[in-house]
Structure formats: structure tokens, C-alpha cells
């Protein structure tokens, strides 16, 4: 493991009933970078996020966060260490106010000092005006923003973003890119799972491409887009 | 000097008036009704804490009530004063909750509900045969009388129940305004998100479960001081589940005032329909169905919807404004 790696995935495997969802995946995430995780549907991207977040436990392999083996940690402990995640389909605390959604993460997830201004986070995702709204009353686009806000509220070092731009219109993309950039400027390391190619190419430093559970390419967006295996996976 | 808030003063005033009832010569019947109301209120409050705020549909309050009752009763047979037995009963209920928590919390939602439902049945069967003290019984039914409570007046019992009910309300009030309440509501809304936001789901559920079991045990033991005889069928009867559950659902699950309103209605119905035997359950069932269909958020939800709290709230605020000015 290199010195700058925040997270390292070491030969991780996970299968569900004989189907290999994640097969022998190895890569590192460097401090302060935005790493894109790309691949066709069913490539195992979300499974991999769930393995990192502690929702699933790998069948074999290790996951190290800041040098610490977190392979068998429970989700709440992983959050305490500084990994936050968003869900592909927003999963808010529906009956709580928007600010209380953040408050849960701030009061239970933030174990590393540094009190955060929740209003600043809400402002970043354009939800400040709706902070006293019940989360269940928000529109889907706002719920996506709330996912990011809640993840930030636990003051993470590493943040796992699962398809933040999915379902957004073309016009919203620049704002999403801008927001990702601002999160990075806060000193966060980001793993970005994304289908929207524009977001992927413009937001990330490096890309790991997966197909059918395996890693088929890794490199800068430019390198990866020229890779034959990647082209084959996407265009057949 | 800081003037306490008017709502606080009003709550204290209600409590004082209720506490004075036995002294000022209120008819004994009333004390009887209110005693039962307080017991149901405490049970309903705790059921609401679990179902309404923690997302645990707990179908075993009768396990806690029965265990606490048996602990109290058996205790008095071996020389334990009933005051100690009361606390011991609640402690045993909480201990039982602790024992079942690990397997029970591995089940989610409806599976948790069904899993907990079988426990009181198992306990009922166990207490049919298990008779640790006293002479062996002929045939079924290992009943015990609660000894040494003959000198406890109805007034004393009333105060005990009032104290337990007030404590249950105060406890829920405190929990909901503390960090714990936020975590519990998060679990109720979405366990996955709660866990990934740093909430230790098992620990919080356990705290909530233990508190509920303890208070339910207290209320149960208090009932068996009032009605000093316990049998497996009476101690572990499903009524200890149905009535608090009904009170919570009719009153408004997930609201603080819901169980209070609901417990009053359930108690009222119980005495109103007492002469109709099986019909009483039938009528209560119909009322429950109507409420669930027409008022999914209970009576408390309806009151909020029509803005029934607005006027009293304004009144209180205006009054408070005046007080603080002078």
C-alpha cells in the first residue's frame, strides 16, 4: 500500500448464490482524489460500495482504510472512522425535518471532532430554504441533494457517491460538477459511481472500470476511454 | 427568578389535582377507573415508544407484565416485601428483554413482531407447570396469591399507578428531546440510512426495549398489587398486548398525546362494555378497524390536522407573554 492511499481494496471477492458480484478487485484510492467507478449495469459497482460501507462482508480479501483493516466492521463503525455514503435511490429519514436528517449524521456519525455548520452544508446543496421541510415531502431532485448533505454531515474523510447525477436533467449537470468540486476542496476524498459520462469525465482524476464483477481497466479518463476492453464492454 | 413555562405549570397542576383525589373523598369507583387508566397509560406509552418511535412492533408486553407479576407474587411467598417485589418484577422483565434481544433484533419488521408474539405463550405454558414454592397444584394452573398486600389501600395503589403513568410520560418526553430520541426516530424511518450515518442500531433498540420492558413490568406488578392473584392465563393474557396496542393506534401512534387519549378511550370502553362479555371485544375491534381506516394517524393526528391545538397554544402564549411582562 502506497503512503498516499486512503483506501485500499485488496483482492476482494463477493458472490451471491453462485454469481460473482465482485471478483478479485484490487485498487487504491489516493488522498484528496476523485476516483470514478464505472461500468455497465450489473458490473458490481454498488456491491463494491456496499462492501466498503460495511453493508456486506467480503467472502475473501481485505479492505484497508487509512491503514486500518475495516473488512469486518459494522456500517456504523465505518461511518465513525470517516467513510460516508449516499444511496443510489435516496433513502432519507422520511418523517424527520431536513435539518434533523443531517442532525442524525452529525450527532451519531461525527466522532472526529470538528463541529460542522449544518447550514453551510445545506447551502452547498441548495437545500437551506427547505431545512424545516419534512424530508418525505421533498421532490426527488432535492432528495438526491439531501443524500449528499447527510453524508457530509458526518464529517467524513472519504465519501462514496452512488449516482448523484442519475435522473438529473442536462441543465443541472454543471451545478452537480461544481458541487463535487467544492466537496473535494473541503479536503474530502471521493469515490464516484456514475453513469452520466459527462460527469464522469469532467469530475474525476482517475477511473476504475468494472465489468461483470471484474476490474477491466484503470487510469485517467483519457486512457480509459481508449481502452479496448472498455470499449468492448460498453459497445460490444 | 426564572419563571417556569406555563405548560410545565399546567402539567404539574394536573398532576397535583390527580394526586389529591384519594384525599378529597372522590368516590372509590373513580379511583378504580383511574387506576386502570394509569396502568393502560403506562403500557400504551411504552408500546408507543417501541412501535411509534423505534419501529419495533413488539407483541410481547404480556410477557413483561406476567413475569413481573409472577416475580412479585412468588417473592411475597418467600418473604420479600411487595415494595421490593415491585422493583424486582420490573427488573426481571427487563432482564428477560435483555435475554431475548439478540435473537429478536436479528428479525426485522413483521418477523420481529411474530417472533415476539410466541414468547408469552411459551411463558404461559412454562408457568402452568413450574411451581417453585408452595404446595403442588392438582392439574393445570399454577396460580399464586400476592401475600401481604391486604393492608395496601386503594389510595396507595392509585398513587402508585399515577406515579408510574406520570413517570412513563415524563420518560418519553425526555427521550424524544434528547439525542436518543433522534436516533430512535432515525431507526424507525430507515435502518440502513441510520446505520450508515453512524447509529448503533442494536444498542439503541436495546436501550428502548429495556426501558419499555422495565416500565411495563412496573405497571404489571402494580396491577397485581391491586388485583392480588396471578395465574398463567391472567398474567400472560393477550389483553396486556391488545389494550395498549389499541390505545396507541386509536390515540395516534408516534405522537406523545396519542397514548393518553387512547388509554382514556380504551379504559372508558372497558367499563362501559363490561356487561356485554364477548360483545365488548367485538365492538372494540370494530372501533379499531374504523380508526385505522379513517384515521391512520389516530385521534391525535386528526386533532393536529384540524388545528385543534392552535387555539390553546395561542392562549398559552398570550398568557405567558403577559406574565413575563409584569
Image (spheres, rainbow, N blue to C red):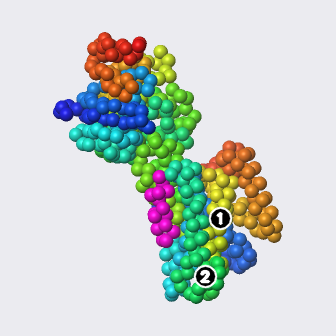
State yes or no: residue A48 in magenta: no
Residue B194, horizontal then vertical, whole percent: 45, 44
Which badge, 1 or 2, is on the more N-terminal residue? 2
Q: Nearer the viewer, residue A97 or B196?
A: B196
Q: Residue furthest front?
A: A18
Residue under the image location 53 percent in, 58 percent down: B172
Check disc 2 and report the residue beneath it.
B144
Label 2 residue SS: strand
Residue B223 visible in the shown view: no
| Cα–Cα span, label 1 and label 2 | 19 Å
Query: Mark 1 Cα within 10 Å, few/some/many (few <14, many 20+)?
Result: some
Q: Nearer the viewer, residue B273 or A44?
A: A44
Specify the subunit that label 1 lies on.
B
State yes or no: residue B96 in magenta: yes
Residue A89, horizontal then vertical, whole percent: 49, 31
Disc marking residue B238: 1
Which picture quadrant has residue A148?
A: top left
Which picture quadrant has residue B236?
A: bottom right
Residue A171, horizontal then vertical, whole percent: 47, 15
Tell me where the magenta segment starts and ends, as one range.
B91-106
Label 1 residue SS: loop
Residue under the image location 33 percent in, 29 percent down: A190
Assess whether mark 2 and mark 1 are in contact (beta carbons under 8 angstroms): no
Amino acid at each position: 500500500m502506497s503512503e498516499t492511499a486512503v483506501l485500499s481494496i485488496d483482492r476482494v471477492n463477493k458472490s451471491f448464490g453462485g454469481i460473482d458480484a465482485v471478483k478479485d478487485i484490487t485498487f487504491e484510492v489516493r488522498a484528496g482524489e476523485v476516483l470514478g467507478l464505472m461500468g455497465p449495469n450489473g458490473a458490481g459497482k454498488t456491491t463494491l460500495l456496499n462492501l466498503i460501507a460495511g453493508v456486506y462482508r467480503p467472502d475473501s480479501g481485505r479492505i484497508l482504510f487509512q491503514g486500518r483493516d475495516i473488512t469486518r466492521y459494522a456500517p456504523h463503525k465505518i461511518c465513525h472512522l470517516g467513510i460516508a455514503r449516499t444511496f443510489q435511490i435516496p433513502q432519507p429519514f422520511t418523517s424527520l425535518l431536513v435539518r434533523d436528517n443531517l442532525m442524525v449524521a452529525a450527532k451519531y456519525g461525527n466522532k472526529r471532532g470538528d463541529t460542522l455548520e449544518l447550514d453551510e452544508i445545506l447551502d452547498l446543496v441548495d437545500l437551506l430554504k427547505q431545512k424545516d421541510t419534512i424530508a418525505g415531502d421533498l421532490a426527488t431532485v432535492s432528495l438526491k441533494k439531501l443524500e449528499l448533505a447527510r453524508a457530509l454531515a458526518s464529517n467524513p474523510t472519504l465519501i462514496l457517491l452512488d449516482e448523484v447525477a442519475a435522473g438529473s436533467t442536462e441543465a443541472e449537470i454543471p451545478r452537480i460538477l461544481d458541487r463535487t468540486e467544492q466537496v473535494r476542496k473541503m479536503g474530502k476524498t471521493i469515490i464516484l459511481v456514475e453513469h452520466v459520462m459527462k460527469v464522469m469525465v469532467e469530475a474525476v482524476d482517475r477511473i476504475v472500470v468494472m465489468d461483470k464483477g471484474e476490474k477491466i481497466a484503470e487510469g485517467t479518463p483519457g486512457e480509459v476511454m481508449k481502452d479496448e476492453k472498455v470499449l468492448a464492454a460498453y459497445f460490444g | 427568578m426564572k419563571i417556569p413555562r406555563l405548560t410545565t405549570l399546567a402539567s404539574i397542576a394536573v398532576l397535583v389535582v390527580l394526586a389529591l383525589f384519594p384525599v378529597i373523598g372522590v368516590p372509590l369507583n373513580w379511583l378504580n377507573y383511574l387506576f386502570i387508566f394509569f396502568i393502560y397509560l403506562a403500557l400504551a406509552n411504552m408500546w408507543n415508544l417501541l412501535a411509534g418511535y423505534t419501529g419495533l412492533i413488539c407483541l410481547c408486553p404480556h410477557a413483561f407484565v406476567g413475569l413481573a407479576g409472577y416475580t412479585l407474587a412468588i417473592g411475597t411467598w418467600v418473604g420479600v416485601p411487595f415494595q421490593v417485589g415491585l422493583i424486582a418484577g420490573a427488573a426481571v422483565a427487563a432482564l428477560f428483554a435483555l435475554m431475548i434481544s439478540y435473537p429478536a433484533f436479528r428479525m426485522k419488521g413483521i418477523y420481529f413482531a411474530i417472533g415476539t408474539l410466541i414468547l408469552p405463550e411459551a411463558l404461559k405454558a412454562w408457568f402452568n407447570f413450574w411451581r417453585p414454592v408452595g404446595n403442588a397444584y392438582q392439574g393445570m394452573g399454577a396460580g399464586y396469591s400476592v401475600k401481604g398486600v391486604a393492608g395496601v389501600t386503594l389510595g396507595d395503589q392509585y398513587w402508585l399507578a399515577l406515579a408510574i403513568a406520570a413517570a412513563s410520560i415524563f420518560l418519553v418526553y425526555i427521550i424524544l428531546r434528547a439525542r436518543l430520541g433522534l436516533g430512535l426516530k432515525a431507526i424507525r424511518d430507515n435502518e440502513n440510512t441510520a446505520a450508515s450515518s453512524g447509529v448503533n442500531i442494536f444498542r439503541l433498540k436495546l436501550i428502548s426495549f429495556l426501558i419499555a420492558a422495565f416500565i411495563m413490568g412496573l405497571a404489571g406488578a402494580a396491577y397485581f398489587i391491586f388485583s392480588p392473584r396471578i395465574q398463567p392465563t391472567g398474567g400472560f393474557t393477550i389483553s396486556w398486548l391488545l389494550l395498549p396496542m389499541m390505545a396507541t393506534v386509536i390515540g395516534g401512534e408516534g405522537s406523545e398525546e396519542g397514548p393518553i387519549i387512547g388509554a382514556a378511550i380504551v379504559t372508558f370502553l372497558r367499563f362501559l362494555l363490561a356487561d356485554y362479555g364477548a360483545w365488548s371485544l367485538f365492538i372494540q375491534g370494530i372501533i379499531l378497524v374504523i380508526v385505522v381506516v379513517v384515521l391512520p394517524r389516530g385521534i391525535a393526528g386528526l386533532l393536529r390536522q384540524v388545528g385543534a391545538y392552535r387555539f390553546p397554544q395561542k392562549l398559552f402564549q398570550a398568557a405567558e407573554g403577559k406574565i413575563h411582562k409584569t
